[in-house]
Image (tube, helix red, strand yellow):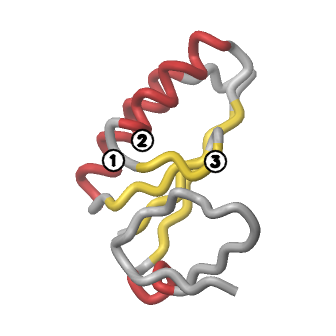
Amino acid sequence: MLRLVAYDIASPRRLRRVAEACEDHGVRIQKSLFECWLEEPEFTHLWTRLCGIIDAKDDCLVAYTLDSGAARVRRTAGVRMHCTDRFERYLF
């Protein structure tokens, strides 16, 4: 499954730790957005790790799960993003 993980972290130290955790499991698409191809056990591990890093009073963390059909439909425009290549990208 494709997991999109996005975050807004108030502390530079926590921000660095969250980014490092996401880099261990996926590809950075934008500064605070990662594409991670993870099945449920691996994603649960990452999510638990991230929740242990953030401060729930100050930070925001969100993840979206896309099935293979939804993950195939991707549009990009402008400067080319570094996206994962699991499926063919559609450029419009």
Type of amino acid at the residue the image marks with label 2:
Trp
**Viewer-nearest of labels 1 and 3?**
3
Name the residue rendered at 34%, 73% in the picture: 86
Secondary structure type for disc 3: strand
Residue 80's x, y, as percent? 63, 63
Residue 78's x, y, as percent? 75, 67
Q: Disc number at residue 47?
A: 2
Which residue occupies the extreme front position in the image? 79
The image quadrant where one finds the C terminus is: bottom right
Type of amino acid at the residue the image marks with label 1:
Thr
Check the image and report above or below for 79 versus 46.
Answer: below
CA gap between label 2 and label 3 equals: 19 Å
Q: Pointer 2 and pointer 1: residues touching (CB < 8 Å)?
A: yes
Type of amino acid at the residue the image marks with label 3:
Gln
* Classed neighbour count for the residue bearing mark 1: other residues with Cα under 10 Å, few (<14), some (14–19), many (≥20): few
CA gap between label 1 and label 3 equals: 22 Å
* Classed neighbour count for the residue bearing mark 2: other residues with Cα under 10 Å, few (<14), some (14–19), many (≥20): some
Secondary structure type for disc 1: helix
Q: Disc number at residue 30?
A: 3
Check the image and report above or below for 32 versus 90.
Answer: above
The image quadrant where one finds the N terminus is: bottom left
Name the residue rendered at 33%, 36% in the picture: 24
Give 55 or 83, whichever is nearer the viewer.
Answer: 83
Q: Disc number at residue 44?
A: 1
* Classed neighbour count for the residue bearing mark 3: other residues with Cα under 10 Å, few (<14), some (14–19), many (≥20): few
Q: Pointer 2 and pointer 3: residues touching (CB < 8 Å)?
A: no
Name the residue rendered at 38%, 70% in the picture: 85
Q: Quadrant of residue 88?
A: bottom left
**Viewer-nearest of labels 2 and 3?**
3
- Whichever of callouts 2 and 3 sits on the residue coming sooner in the sequence is 3
CA gap between label 2 and label 1 equals: 5 Å
